[in-house]
Image: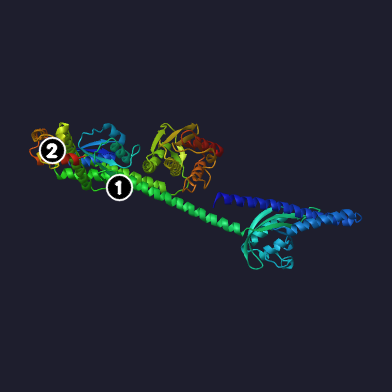
């Protein structure tokens, strides 16, 4: 589903709304005219010229409603259809007005929507203007999705005596919406899969390093022992190396587990620098593949941040990966990503990820966080939008900038200080 | 004799240390460099040996280092170590003149065999280079006239035919020829032919 289609639908809905409002206004005017006309007839039968004008007006309005391409109808409180225009007859597959006028509207509403329809009727007769959707089963048993804009009609004393409804067929829109939703689910799945595939490649490479080091140390020992060129004491050092590398492999797996574990936002006071280092370890393979250096400028004296570390890892991972891709795509001469951490203010820490890629144009900067907005050839445009929602759910915010050298993304995260104060406040309220 | 050295360039220090430990177990000398640039800065081209190089490194990659060495006419044989999914890169590296490549995880014997072959290759090349340098020096000591006489003799002409061709007396040709034999330290015409061919064949 493209943004263009979304826009067209939005425009249609807005137009529909405007049209409905106009028609309701028109309908109201029509009925007011009729009331006025009656009053005039009652009290001032002598004023023929005014009457003529009013009749002329009513005729004109009736013509407009009759030729109106959307269904316009009047209903009584019990759902009886009082009046309906030709477009309305077509909508419910009626051959003549008698097929539907005088019958209950519920005869064309799908059973599972009757209650919803009744509720909306109640609201209109209580004085509200409403918009509702329902599934219709027409007189010829055709199933269609309908949308009705309904408003109450009042008599001279202000009593509501009918519902004026403008209804249109939104079946196509519904199907398109359904398709878009399915497509979106599919995209999310593909994005997840490709991230998993990339991760698998990264993990394979990461694990290869300590595993080959272990094999080399062990084989070196065996060779020396076989040729009697090694004492037992001399075994200690290489064996320590073996243990260290086994632990390194274990650490990588632990990170993988943490990374993929699905969980709700579970915030804890965390060292942001530790999170940054963990992500760098993960994305190192990709960066290396693109001959890109990742520099860290981490302030060691930062307060702890209150975050779900896995979520924040995902955000940083996303930003670093985007940076690597931007540098690769532009084939930049300088290939560097710099990650800064610093104190933002008394309550927040800031993380900055800058790259030496082509940067972002003014036009793009405003859109980078939008869903499905992407500058990548085969991107789906979900990464930054997800990142932003993660940061915002932590109470921070994220910004994109572009200066002379590449793009810079900055986001803030609350520190334990503010959290502590919040708790204090909460405590004082309770006590 | 120039003792062979295995040069290791790998940014992963643990892997580099383990390679050193493994390679030293067969009593080879090892020098480790943490980056391609460090190798360029610290390598002494006169040393016999081979280079064990990680394809992927931050900064200058293994492939880039190979390009740099080729450009500088440093012909140390390179064994590339490749990781997951890098085989195509390695194949291209071999096409560009790398000695060999080995994929991680590798069998230790495979790596050590490749290292031995690379060192033997380097030793041969150095010997060939030395021989060529020696021959070049000998040939350079010949006068232009002696060079002409040598070329014709090697082409299979008799002294008389050479004399006719160059418009010299047979006696003069005889003198030149003796001088050539002496300068090139050749004992026979067969030696001369052999040396001329080597001179042409060697790089």
Color theme of the render: rainbow
Q: Nearer the viewer, residue A246 or A179?
A: A179
Q: Quick check: A25 above or below B165? A: below
Does A89 sit left or right of A207 as displayed?
A: right
Q: Chain of mark 2?
A: B
Label annotation for residue B164: 2
Query: Quadrant of the rendered structure where residue A137 is?
Result: bottom right
Residue at image location 61% in from the left, 52% down from the top: A9
Q: Nearer the viewer, residue A135 or B80?
A: B80
Q: Quick check: A169 above or below B188? A: below
- Give the distance between the C-alpha atoms of the residues marked 1 and 2, in whole angstroms: 57 Å
Mark 1 or 2, which is nearer the eye? Answer: 2
Q: Quick check: A404 above or below B83? A: above
Marks 1 and 2, the one that precedes in the sequence: 1
Label annotation for residue B143: none
| Image label count | 2
Does A314 sit left or right of B38 as displayed?
A: right
Query: Quadrant of the rendered structure where residue A80 is?
Result: bottom right
For label 1, the SS is helix
- Callout 2 crowding tier (Cα within 10 Å): few <14, some 14–19, many ≥20: few
In the image as oriented, which residue stretches furthest toward the right? A46
Image spot of residue A24 (x, y percent): 73, 53
Q: Quick check: A37 above or below B167? A: below
Q: Quadrant of the C terminus of chain A?
A: top right
Q: Are marks 1 and 2 in contact (CB under 8 Å)?
A: no
Q: Is residue B72 visible?
A: yes
- Callout 1 crowding tier (Cα within 10 Å): few <14, some 14–19, many ≥20: some
Q: Which residue is mark 1?
A: B91
Q: Are marks 1 and 2 on the same chain?
A: yes
Residue at image location 70% in from the left, 61% down from the top: A87
């Amino acid at each position: 589903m493209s943004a263009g289609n979304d826009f067209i639908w939005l425009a249609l809905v807005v137009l529909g709304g405007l049209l409905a409002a106009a028609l309701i206004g028109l309908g109201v005017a029509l009925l007011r005219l009729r009331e006025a006309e009656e009053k005039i007839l009652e009290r001032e039968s002598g004023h023929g010229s005014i009457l003529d004008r009013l009749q002329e007006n009513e005729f004109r309005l009736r013509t407009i409603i009759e030729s109106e391409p959307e269904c316009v109808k009047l209903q009584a409180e019990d759902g009886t259809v009082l009046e309906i225009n030709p477009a309305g007859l077509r909508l419910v597959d009626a051959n003549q007005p008698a097929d539907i006028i005088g019958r209950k509207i519920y005869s064309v509403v799908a059973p599972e929507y009757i209650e919803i329809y009744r509720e909306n009727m109640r609201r209109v007769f209580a004085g509200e203007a409403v918009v509702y959707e329902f599934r219709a089963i027409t007189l010829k048993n055709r199933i269609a999705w309908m949308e009705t804009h309904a408003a109450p009609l009042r008599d001279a004393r202000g009593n509501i005596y009918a519902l004026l409804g403008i209804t249109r067929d939104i079946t196509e829109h519904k199907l398109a919406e359904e398709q878009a939703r399915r497509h979106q689910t599919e995209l999310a799945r593909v994005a997840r899969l490709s991230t998993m595939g990339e991760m698998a490649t990264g993990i394979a490479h990461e694990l290869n390093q300590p595993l080959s080091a272990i094999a080399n140390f062990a084989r070196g020992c065996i060779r020396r022992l076989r040729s009697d060129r090694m004492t037992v004491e001399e075994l200690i050092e290489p064996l320590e190396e073996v243990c260290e590398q086994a632990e390194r492999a274990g650490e990588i797996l632990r990170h993988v587990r943490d990374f993929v574990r699905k969980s709700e936002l579970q915030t804890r006071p965390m060292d942001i620098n530790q999170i940054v280092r963990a992500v760098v370890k993960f994305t190192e393979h990709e960066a290396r593949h693109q001959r890109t250096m990742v520099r860290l400028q981490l302030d060691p004296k930062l307060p702890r941040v209150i975050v779900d570390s896995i979520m924040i890892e995902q955000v940083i991972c996303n930003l670093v990966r985007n940076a690597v891709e931007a540098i690769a795509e532009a084939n930049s001469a300088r290939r560097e990503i710099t990650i800064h951490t610093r104190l933002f203010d008394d309550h927040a820490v800031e993380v900055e990820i800058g790259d030496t890629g082509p940067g972002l144009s003014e036009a793009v900067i405003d859109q980078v966080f939008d869903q499905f907005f992407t500058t990548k050839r085969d991107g789906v445009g979900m990464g930054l939008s997800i990142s932003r929602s993660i940061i915002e759910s932590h109470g921070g915010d994220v910004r994109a900038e572009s200066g002379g050298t590449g793009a810079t993304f900055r986001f803030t995260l609350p520190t334990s200080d503010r959290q502590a104060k919040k708790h204090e406040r909460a405590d004082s309220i309770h006590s | 004799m120039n003792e062979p050295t295995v040069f290791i360039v790998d940014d992963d220090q643990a892997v580099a240390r383990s390679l050193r430990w493994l390679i030293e177990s067969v009593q080879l000398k090892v020098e480790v460099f943490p980056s391609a640039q460090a190798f360029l800065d610290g390598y002494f081209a006169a040393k016999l040996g081979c280079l064990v190089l990680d394809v992927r490194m931050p900064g200058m990659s293994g492939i880039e280092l190979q390009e740099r060495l080729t450009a500088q006419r440093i012909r140390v044989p390179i064994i590339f170590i490749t990781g997951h999914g890098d085989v195509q890169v390695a194949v291209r590296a071999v096409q560009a003149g790398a000695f060999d490549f080995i994929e991680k995880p590798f069998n230790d014997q495979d790596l050590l065999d490749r290292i031995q072959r690379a060192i033997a290759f380097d030793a041969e090349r150095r010997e060939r280079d030395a021989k060529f340098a020696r021959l070049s020096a000998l040939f350079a000591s010949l006068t232009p006239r002696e060079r002409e006489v040598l070329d014709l003799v090697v082409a299979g002409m008799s002294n008389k035919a050479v004399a006719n061709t160059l418009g010299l007396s047979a006696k003069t040709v005889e003198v030149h020829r003796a001088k050539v034999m002496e300068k090139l330290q050749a004992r026979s015409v067969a030696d001369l032919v052999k040396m001329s061919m080597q001179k042409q064949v060697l790089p």
